[in-house]
Image (cartoon, helix red, strand yellow):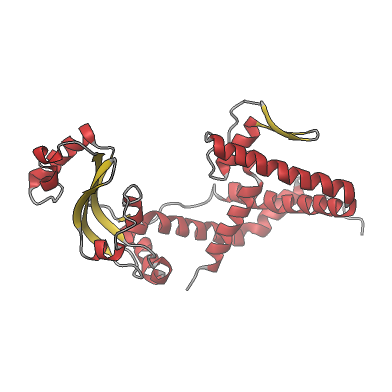
Amino acid sequence: MVNNRFIAFRQAGVIAGLFCFTLLYSCNNNNRVIASVDNIELTENDAYRIMSHLGMNPNDSIELRNFADSWCIKETFKAELKQDYSDTWQLIKLRAESFSGDLAEYFFEEIELKKELDTIIKKKEIQDYYDSHKEEFILHDYIVKALYLKIPKGLDFKSEDVHVNYLLKNDKDLTELNSYAKLYAENYYFNDSTWIYFEEVTKDIPIGNFNIDNIVLNRTKTYFSDDNFTYFLNIIDYKLKDEAPPVNFLLNEIKSRIVANRLQELKEKNESKLIQRIKKKHEIIISI
């Protein structure tokens, strides 16, 4: 069964984060104006704060320009609304003020109740959660244990037995491959104790013309070249799509879910007490 409380909690966090980004990113103290609409200005500092919180790269000049373009369009809509539809603009401001109260309550509860939150999670709790929520973790991509090596085309890798060592048939192969990779690899990955998404391993490999199912299911060991590089791929083990991955693959996600559920339970248990405590500290007048 889907944990609706957890999903609601995560959704609230996302919404809150999007509206409160300016509180969550430290300034770079650059107040150079990079865009303006009428008398409203966007500084480089504010752009960096917003973009970084939204997962954008403010150091990418193209992304920064696109963000500035988007910001200008939104500001022009606001300006038009203020000028031509003042009643609607007043409603927007009232809704924003109302929503800021919801956000304040959300963040205040988080800060206060996290002081009481137990974040220690036992292995049995993780296993129990995994067993009772397996259907929520069904894979939509293969996860694999694999070796991947990318080297510049033109290197005489055969004289170094790279085309043999990447097969990992002997104990010494990995040692020799690691040494070679440190000297020549553009990219290299191998960890036989950790599962990783297949698409993560192969994001740097031009495999568009290959049948991915065949590569994984046949535990393919192959190497090939394009105009610039030679690629080595060894699929050592895999887990099928449409199955739940091993519990170890999900440790961090399960821990986050358990902690989130604990925090939600604390909120439900202590919300009224917290409200009463806060109300006592302020002068509240209701005149109706």
Residue drawn 11% across the image and 38% down it: 160
Q: Nearer the viewer, residue 189 or 7?
A: 189
Which residue is situated farthest in the front direction here?
A: 227
Residue drawn 85% across the image and 55% down it: 88
Where residue 109 sits in the image (x, y, percent)?
A: 62, 51
- x%, y% of residue 249? 33, 57
Give above or below for 239 relative to 162: below
Which quarter of the figure has residue 174?
top left
In what quadrant of the picture does the C terminus appear? bottom right
What residue appears at the point 63 percent right and 31 percent down from the top-left corner?
A: 45
Residue at far bottom of view: 1
Answer with left or right where residue 138 lies relative to residue 233: right
230 relative position to 70: left or right = left
Q: Position of residue 159 (x, y in %)?
A: 9, 38
Q: Left or right? Give the position of 10 relative to 118.
A: right
> Up-down: is 230 above or below 263?
above
Q: Most extreme residue toward the right, as rendered?
A: 288
Horizontally, is 213 left or right of 274 in the view?
A: left
Picture layout, residue 72 above or below residue 124? above
Frontmost residue, 40 versus 12: 40
Q: Position of residue 5 (x, y in %)?
A: 56, 65
